[in-house]
Amino acid sequence: MRQFLQTQPPSFSKAKDPLEAHDWLLEVEKKLETVGCSDEEKVRYAAHQLTGLAGAWWSNFKHNHAKNEHVTWTVFKQAFTLAFVPDGKVAIKKREFRNLSQGNKRLGEYVHQFTELSRYV
């Protein structure tokens, strides 16, 4: 946990834009992988960063999850995404990515948009 916290992971409570939740998950996952966390540690450490509304969501999720069933990282990511990132928002970004073309944009602007949208595919 000490190594993970040294990476200065962001906390998450709620987001005005649902894509902020998606970005939080990507950032936390990157930091978890950096410190070499096990599947169980990933869930425990990521959940530690949930506060406010998201913390309440996690408490309810754990309470309603089967007592003998281990929450895997995959299950955590799916449940978090379902709770905080509507499918429609990510679908819009995926569609924007698929339809992206340089057109008359400068190369730097095009690369920036490509990189920004590639997070969602």
Image (cartoon, rainbow, N blue to C red):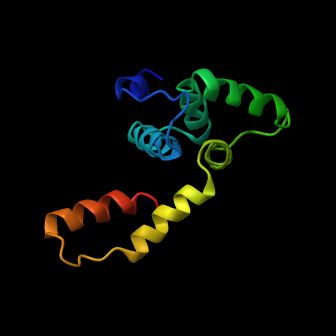
Look at the image and tell me whether residue 121 can be seen. Answer: no
Give the vertical position of 21 relative to 52 (above or below).
below
- Seen in the picture, residue 100 relative to 118 is either above or below; the reply is below
Q: Is residue 74 above or below residue 60?
A: below
Residue at the extreme front: 104
Q: Quadrant of residue 114?
A: bottom left
As rendered, which of 24 and 20 lies closer to the eye? 20
Q: Does any portion of residue 52 appear in the rendered image?
A: yes
* Residue 35 lies in quadrant: top left
Residue 2, horizontal then vertical, whole percent: 43, 20
Residue that appears at 51% across and 29% down: 12
Residue under the point 38% across and 63% down: 118
**Percent position (x, y) of residue 8?**
36, 26
Q: Residue at x 71, y 40 (%)?
A: 71
Q: Is residue 83 left or right of residue 33?
A: right
Q: How many marks?
A: 0
Q: Is residue 53 left or right of residue 105?
A: right
Q: Is residue 14 left or right of residue 116?
A: right
Say whether residue 71 is left or right of residue 67.
left
Residue at x-position 14% and y-position 69%? 106
